[in-house]
Image (spheres, rainbow, N blue to C red):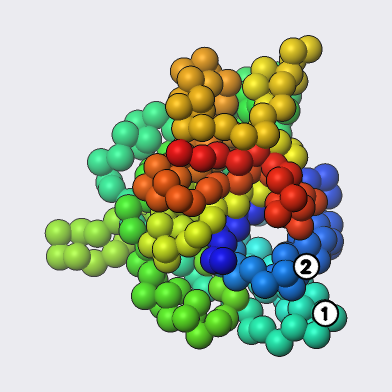
Amino acid sequence: MLNVIALGGNAILDKIPTDEGQREVVRNVARELAKFIQQGEEVVLCHGNGPQVGNLLVQQTVGESDKTPMMKLDTNVAMTEGSIGYWIQQALQNELADLGIKKEVVSIVTQMEVSENDPSFEVPTKPIGPFYTAQEAQEKQAKGEGIYQEDSGRGYRKVIASPKPIQIIEKETILSLIEAGIITICVGGGGIPVIRNEEGALTGVEAVIDKDLSAQKLAEEINADRLIVLTGVDYIYVNYNQPNQKKIEKMTCEEAQGYILENQFPPGSMLPKVESAMAFVKAHPHREAIITSIENLGNIPNGFGTTIVC
């Protein structure tokens, strides 16, 4: 079975933002992925980069000078796509070798076409970077350092444009790698957002594409059987972090739409995960999407995680 597995950037940068701290999380992820592959599953991996690209922007702001100018956001997306892809690639190579599984792993820097007329450029919703208190966020916003919004009860984060993905520029290359049996890591951070000019040439834009929506686009374009979104919780919950919090084990698209109308899923966080899962199963009613934690990956065949069906 061909699975597209999407790993959240917040899941990688969980507590320790250092290089080694994030690589340790990735090694744990790779261990679970290797076990999943050992069960005979075929996987294509993609990942988020919201916290990482935000932190990189902070570093560049602090160190900015005439000799070390800040890079544009699309370049920062490419840089973090490369670094996180490298971490996952190396960790998975090591874990597969330990299990005696002879599989090649490769990570490719991927561009994703978006529309320059996407409404998100007017109303930014995608969180990036570290969490701040309400006071810190107010101070930064007052200084003109961007727009900050509350994120799922965990604090405030900077939000930027998050246009919808249209098509994967390197699609044919990805398909060739899958056909060759190579485990492919692609569309990192949702892919580098690019637009086409009137002559058809590509150019990067200042945005971050939500990796869950790009994962759904990837799953569609490679004809995957299952979309798995790995996040920081074992299941989707309604009334999250409230006394009447409720775990959802299975949810139809109709039920999910009802919860969306109730504003149960925060924009830029769980909402795009649910929307991407819904879009995938609506287009392919015989397929399924699952949202769960990294630790539950190996337990998916036993029914763990929230399953979304048509």
**Residue, x 82% and y 61% (percent of image)?**
28
Name the N-terminal-most of marks 1 and 2: 2
> Which amino acid lies under the numbered mark 2 shown in the image of this protein?
Lys
Counting other residues with Cα less than 10 Å from the Cα at mark 2, is it few (<14), some (14-19), or many (20 or more)? some
Rendering coords of residue 162 (x, y %): 44, 41
The residue singled out by tag 2 in the image is 35
The CA span between labels 1 and 2 is 8 Å
Tag of residue 84: none
Q: At numbered mark 2, what does the secondary structure look like: helix, strand or loop?
A: helix
Q: Which residue is mark 1?
A: 99
Q: Nearer the viewer, residue 158 or 27?
A: 27
Alpha-carbon neighbours of circle 1 within 10 Å: few (<14), some, or many (≥20)? few
Q: Residue 265 at what x, y percent from top left?
A: 57, 26
Is residue 55 visible to the viewer in this orientation of the structure? no
Total labels drawn:
2
- Where on the picture, by quarter, is residue 122? top left
Left or right, 9 with reference to 271: right
Q: Residue at x 45, y 50 (%)?
A: 286
| Contact check, label 1 and label 2, Cβ < 8 Å | yes
Question: 48 or 116, which is in the foreground?
Answer: 48
Whether residue 43 can be seen here: yes
* 275 is higher (above) or lower (below) than 173: above
Quadrant including the N terminus: bottom right
Give the quadrant of the C terminus.
top left
Say which residue appears at 50% left-offset and 59% top-offset. Answer: 225
In the picture as drawn, the residue positioned furthest to the top comes out as 243
Give the vertical position of 249 relative to 44 (above or below): above
Disc 1 element: loop
Q: What residue do we see at 30% from left, 40% from top?
A: 118
List x then y, in percent, for residue 109.
50, 70
Which amino acid, by three-letter code, is at mark 1?
Leu
Q: Quadrant of residue 89?
A: bottom right
